[in-house]
Amino acid sequence: MNSDRYFVPVLFEKQLAIDTPIKVWLADTPVVLIKSTDSLYAYEDFCPHRGAPLSKGFVKDGILTCSYHGWEFNVMGRNKCVPVKNAAVDCALKAIHVKIHNGIIWISNHLNAMVPELSKEEPTFTLNGKIKAGILNTLENFLEGSHTHFVHDGLVRSKKMTRQKIEATLIPNENGFSVHYPSEPPKGLVTFFTPTRLRNLRAVSTYIYPNISVLEYWNDSDTLVARIEGILSEQHTKTAYLARIYLYTGFLTPLAKIIAKPVFKKIIHQDKVILELQEKNLQQFKQRNFVSDDTDAVGCELQKWLYNKENRAVEPFHFIVYW
């Protein structure tokens, strides 16, 4: 997967405290992030003296100090002082490009890398965490619904309910694709206990290259009820997620937020458990290929976008699922 032309999302800005170094990852490279009162800095997490992680150091008066031998670096990454020498040496940290967009911290090796388009609105609430699983399997989990009957049994859908035949439509575009599903009646606690006008919902799943999933739910009046953005990044052996959840329930939104936040936490935890079980098992069967059919259209298209782009769909197509 070549996604170097895009900035990588690593944290919500609100997660990073002032003058508190923190370690994140840019692909397989550790990066130290530092926020001052008026700016943000990122460097490879490597002290040039003996290679200790600078993220384990500390910041005082704008100076980053390595916790091993006390080498000091200013905000430009230049060495300011070596205590045992009582003077500076001619060396500098390798800078990483960093920016804040939509309340998210993004990093890249390339100044002209792009940031994918997301909603400019302030989300109702956010969630974040890490899952020990690959980016492809995590994206597929976030975007497709066939696992919900089992992983989220009774919460989103139920494995005991009679399934409904659904014709879905996948529509490709230059930045990814969207999948449109027809309206469904309530099939789990999430919809059973919502107001009547919000119960029959149609879903639209959108993939934005390289690592963003968006789920939207619309009611029968064609009004957007909820939007969930899953902004993912590969963080060494894990996939980090930044979730922005939007609820469009009018005057009920404050109450809906109180109810929805723990529910979404539960749903993500359930996904995390099954994804990490899957990943652990995949490590035992590294040479096995998956068996897919036309109901796996979302996962198959994701695989093409990430690893086999020339074979991705260029025209809309329909597929049948039983939900």
Image: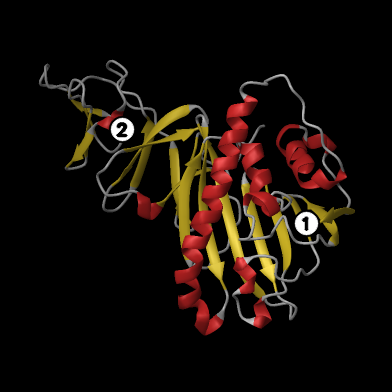
Name the quadrant of the C terminus: bottom right
**Residue 49 vs residue 183, the one in the foreground:** 183
Residue 55, disc: 2
Q: Is residue 32 left or right of residue 172?
A: left
Q: Position of residue 314 (x, y in %)?
A: 86, 47
Number of marks present in the image shown: 2
Q: Is residue 298 left or right of residue 110?
A: right
Image height of 169 relative to 88, above or below: below
At numbered mark 2, what does the secondary structure look like: helix, strand or loop? Answer: helix
| Residue 169, quarter of picture | bottom right
**Residue 139 vs residue 71, the one in the foreground:** 139
Image height of 150 relative to 64, above or below: below
Hey, what amino acid is under mark 1? Val
Q: Position of residue 209 (x, y in %)?
A: 67, 45
Q: Position of residue 292 (x, y in %)?
A: 82, 37
Residue at the image point whose x is 72% and y is 55% from the top: 159
Residue at the image point whose x is 12% and y is 17% from the top: 85
Say which label, 2 or 1, has the lower sequence index: 2
Query: Which callout, 2 or 1, points to the residue nearer the camera?
Result: 1
| Residue 91, quarter of picture | top left
At numbered mark 1, what does the secondary structure look like: helix, strand or loop? Answer: strand
Image height of 1 relative to 214, above or below: above
**Residue 124 vs residue 315, the one in the foreground:** 124
Query: Which residue matches tag 1?
Result: 179
Name the outermost residue toward the front. 160
Q: What distance separates the C-alpha of mark 2 from that of mark 1?
A: 41 Å
Q: Can residue 106 be seen here?
A: no
